[in-house]
């Protein structure tokens, strides 16, 4: 397997090495996955998208059979089906998503970063892992100078985004479609995560998810008209 990321990061200097040693629990799981699935990516997952993006999605962490397998955020599992269909609907991607890194999909005016770069056990990173990985999220955000609208997918992403963007947690509580003004004229929007659990339980519907992106595009165009 190649030792370089299967996708080109919009901020290459913000990415950890494939054998990043910083979180022992995540390293241990990575080693197990490499032994059991040697044909998977099984490493920190790079950001993905347009270096000139004005809209940035901040996710949680790679999914076992999604990004941890393929090496591209939200690619290969159910969450990606809803996300990429929504990106396509709002003109934030081009090409036909086929849940593979070679499907040719490109993001347009949009980039994807994650709060945690590596697969966590049970999809639940612990606080120390979130804090440790925040340096990479910070560098990713700082490396996207045109970004003004940030969409946090879930509560953990919301909390990480607040810290990176300089917001005050007590004044910006997470809530679906909640909108928070950040320093520097940036805006943080919240969404429930597009996980299978949230959609199967009805916590998140397609219409609810699309409403977040509709608002993001409206805000983008108000801040910087075409």
Image (tube, grey):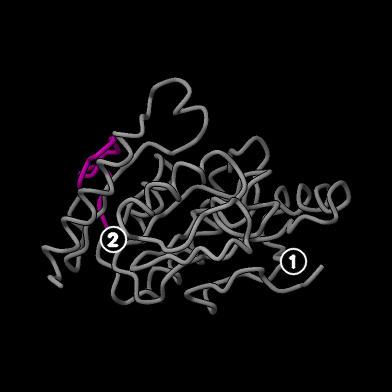
**Marks 1 and 2, the one that precedes in the sequence:** 1
On whether residue 192 falls in the magenta region, the answer is no
Tag count in the figure? 2
Disc on res. 154: none
Q: Quadrant of residue 126?
A: top right
Residue occupying image coordinates x 51% and y 63%:
105
Left or right of 9, for residue 225: left
Residue 120, horizontal then vertical, whole percent: 65, 44
Task: State the quadrant of the C terminus.
Answer: bottom left
Q: Callout 1: helix, strand or loop?
A: loop
Residue 178, horizontal then vertical, whole percent: 22, 40
**Main secondary structure along the magenta-highlighted residues:** loop
Residue occupying image coordinates x 25% and y 41%:
211
Q: State the residue position of label 1.
A: 19
Q: Residues within 10 Å of mark 1 (few under 14, many from 20)?
A: few
Residue occupying image coordinates x 44% and y 46%:
83
Residue 203 higher or lower than 190, as above or below: above
Which stretch did the figure color magenta? 165-179
Q: CA distance from mark 1 to mark 2?
A: 30 Å
Q: State the residue position of label 2.
A: 166
């Amino acid at each position: 397997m190649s030792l370089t990321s299967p996708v080109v990061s919009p901020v290459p200097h913000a990415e950890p090495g494939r054998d990043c040693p910083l979180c022992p629990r995540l390293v241990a799981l990575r080693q197990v996955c490499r032994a059991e699935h040697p044909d998977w990516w099984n490493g920190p997952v790079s950001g993905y998208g347009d270096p000139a993006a004005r809209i940035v999605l901040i996710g949680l962490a790679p999914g076992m059979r999604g990004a941890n397998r393929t090496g591209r955020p939200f690619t290969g599992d159910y969450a990606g089906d809803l996300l990429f269909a929504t990106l396509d609907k709002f003109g934030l991607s081009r090409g036909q998503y086929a849940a593979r890194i070679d499907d040719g999909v490109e993001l347009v005016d949009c980039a994807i970063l994650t709060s945690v770069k590596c697969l966590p056990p049970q999809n639940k990173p612990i606080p120390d892992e979130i804090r440790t990985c925040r340096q990479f999220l910070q560098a990713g955000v700082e490396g996207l100078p045109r970004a003004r609208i940030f969409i946090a997918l879930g509560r953990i992403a919301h909390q990480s985004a607040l810290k990176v963007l300089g917001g005050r947690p007590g004044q910006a509580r997470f809530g679906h479609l909640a909108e928070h003004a950040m320093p520097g004229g940036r805006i943080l929007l919240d969404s429930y995560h597009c996980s299978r659990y949230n959609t199967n339980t009805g916590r998140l519907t397609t219409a609810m998810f699309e409403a977040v992106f509709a608002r993001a595009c409206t805000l983008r165009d108000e801040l910087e008209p075409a």
